[in-house]
Amino acid sequence: MSSVSPDYGLEALHLKNPESLIHTEVKIRIPKARHPDPVISNLINRYGLKVNILGALLGANGEEDGWFDLAIEGRAGTIHEALLDLVELEADLWFNTEADDGY
């Protein structure tokens, strides 16, 4: 089962003007079952987001979950939609709310 912590992180994105440009930081746990999927690449290609990988832990053997610390820039509505897709993949999200100040 996936989780979003703190809950207001994703909800805060939903409440922003969908067209506003924002910068947010989020830690993501990708389940090992999704190891072969291009999860981070999809954030860039499907949603046109600017993604900077601040840190990552991903075993080459695919026997463990992958962990990513991401800085994401784009429109609030698009980021919200992309992160909801990650939750559907059973990824866990942790937000750095100090980075959600827009620009």
Image (spheres, rainbow, N blue to C red):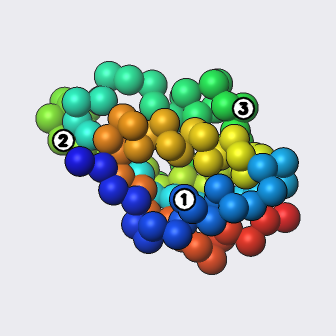
Q: Give the labeled residue for mark 3.
A: 48
Query: Which badge, 1 or 3, comes first in the chain's sequence?
Result: 1
Q: Give the labeled residue for mark 2.
A: 64
Do we see residue 47 in this rendering?
yes
Could you say where residue 45 lies in the image, as x and y percent from the top left?
64, 24
Up/down of 58 relative to 39, above or below? below
Q: Residue at x 58, y 73 (%)?
A: 97
Query: Which badge, 2 or 1, comes first in the chain's sequence?
Result: 1
Q: Check disc 3 and give the amino acid type.
A: Gly
Question: Mark 3 against mark 2, which lies toward the viewer?
Answer: 3
Question: Mark 1 against mark 3, which lies toward the viewer?
Answer: 1
Secondary structure at badge 3 equals loop
Crowding at mark 2 (Cα within 10 Å: few <14, some 14-19, many 20+): some
Is 12 situated left or right of 17 in this image?
A: left
Q: Total label count?
A: 3
| Rendering quarter of residue 32 | top left
Could you say where residue 27 lies in the image, as x and y percent from the top left?
45, 58
The extreme left residue here reads: 63
Crowding at mark 3 (Cα within 10 Å: few <14, some 14-19, many 20+): some
Do we see residue 56 in this rendering?
no
Up/down of 95 relative to 43, above or below? below
- Nearest the viewer among 78 and 66 is 78
Up/down of 49 relative to 76, above or below? above
Q: Check disc 2 and give the amino acid type.
A: Glu
Secondary structure at badge 2 equals loop
Q: Residue at x 69, y 41 (%)?
A: 78
Q: Check disc 1 and give the amino acid type.
A: Leu
Q: Which mark is residue 10?
A: 1
Is 31 situated left or right of 47 in this image?
A: left
Is 84 situated left or right of 46 in this image?
A: left
- Nearest the viewer among 59 and 102 is 102
